[in-house]
Amino acid sequence: MFGMQGDAIGTIIWFLLFFVFVFIYPRMMLSQMIMKLEQSAQRMEQLSVKAKNMIVKKVGKKSKIIDAKVRNFQDFIAIEPTSLDPYGIVRKIDHITRSVETRFQQFVDEIAGEKNKREKQEINFGLRAAIGVHTIAKIVRHYVEIVKKFKNLQLAIILQMQLPEIERIAKSELKGTEAFVGGYPIGDSIGPMVAASLIDKSREITDDVVCGETKILGRKAFVLKAKGPGPHLGRIDEALEKILKKNRIARVITVDAAGKLEGEKTGSVAEGVGFAMAYTAERQLIEDILIPRKIPIDAIAVKVGLEEAITPMKMEIKNSIPEVIDAIKTSTKRTKKHDKIIVIGVGNSCGIGDDKKSLEQAEKTISKLDKKLKKEKEKKRRWF
């Protein structure tokens, strides 16, 4: 009889504990998640502040006014044009892109009017990366506050799963801010670096685009790149139009950094066809120039990771140049003797000059930064 009572009491206690855990454990779990998410949001916000401080330090004016202006500009937005009627959408996007460029230049002139053009460009592109960090911080904060407001466990789990990748991207944007502000070559600079290695002497052909003329396997080659060593992307479409008005071109060869898949080797080279450039309005305009003329377009891509594209260039990326040059020569062989070709180094010219001689300094900087990065990784490995 006492044994039966003990079993009954044990069963009742078990059911009580079961219902307690059913209702209380999810709340405990959510509270723990919210605490971790809050810590992550605060880390992101600290990264945003660091990016802002880099810009202010580069401007060289320590004042509350400059600090406030940069902080406010981190909330800059560009509203995409309506595409309900898709006709003319490329021109609309191009107009917005040019307006963004103008607005950034005006802001940099406002806060750093006494700086030279290269320093202004470094601040300009540093601001873009700083805006990236700030935007990530704002989005993470937004979802953390939603989780806290609605006590949504499912959303908390999804956000927690994504945070490691989000934090990696935010940290790479911060390193990108540092690279732009410091004028260091970045992974995306490999296209302009290849172009500069082919140029003995260059001239500015359109705003922020330089052109050098050389011979490749007996063919006359016009080599284009964004003007350096300040950060520029240039308007390649305008430069192409200028060359095509006076010359009959047999082939266009493009070199650019391309996103690699996990498992692919950084600095590996892939060849193909098409204009190697991110999907932008400018690429559409370029294709509209080349395709009606039936000019063959070759693409040479140097594989870089998502973070590697915006952070200081690694030696593995720089060391791909000889292989890229061989690929350019292979592509050139597809033309006839005495034909004219165009070689375009697509990408950001940050830290990359406009001829072979200027590359000596860039290579020294890359080597120095790469050694520093490897030392930091070695310290972390030893700590673990």
Image (spheres, grey):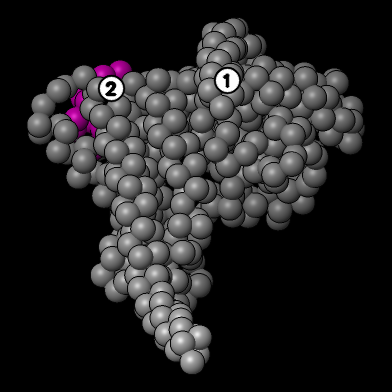
Q: Quadrant of the C terminus?
A: top right
Quarter of the image for residue 151 reads bottom left
Residue 8 shown in magenta: no
Which amino acid type is shown beneath numbered disc 2? Lys
Q: Which residues are magenta?
A: 107-117
> CB atoms at circles 2 and 1 under 8 Å apart?
no
108 with respect to 268 (left or right):
left
Which image quarter: residue 334? top right
Taking the image as drawn, is residue 95 in sight? Answer: yes
Q: Is residue 301 above or below residue 359?
A: below
Q: How many marks?
A: 2
Q: Is residue 114 magenta?
A: yes
Residue found at the very far front of the displayed protein:
1
Front residue of 223 and 26: 26
Residue 247, how many percent across, how many down? 70, 34
Q: Image point 87% across, 30% down: which residue?
A: 330
Q: Residue at x 70, y 55 (%)?
A: 292
Identify the residue at image location x=29%, y=74%.
150
Between label 2 and label 1, give the one nearer the viewer.
1
State the residue position of label 1: 382
Against 247, residue 26 (above or below) is below
Quadrant of the image occupied by residue 252: top right
The residue carrying mark 2 is 58
Q: Residue at x 54, y 11 (%)?
A: 368
The residue nearer to you, when weighing 229 against 257, is 257
Task: Please tell me how crowded label 1 is: few (under 14), some (14-19), or many (20+) other residues with Cα within 10 Å.
Answer: few
Q: Nearer the viewer, residue 342 or 361?
A: 361
Inspect this view and state whether residue 302 appears. Answer: no
Mark 2–mark 1 distance (CA, rounded to whole Å): 34 Å
* Residue 97 point in image, percent of width and height: 41, 50
Q: Amino acid at mark 1?
A: Arg
Residue 336: percent from left, percent from top: 90, 32
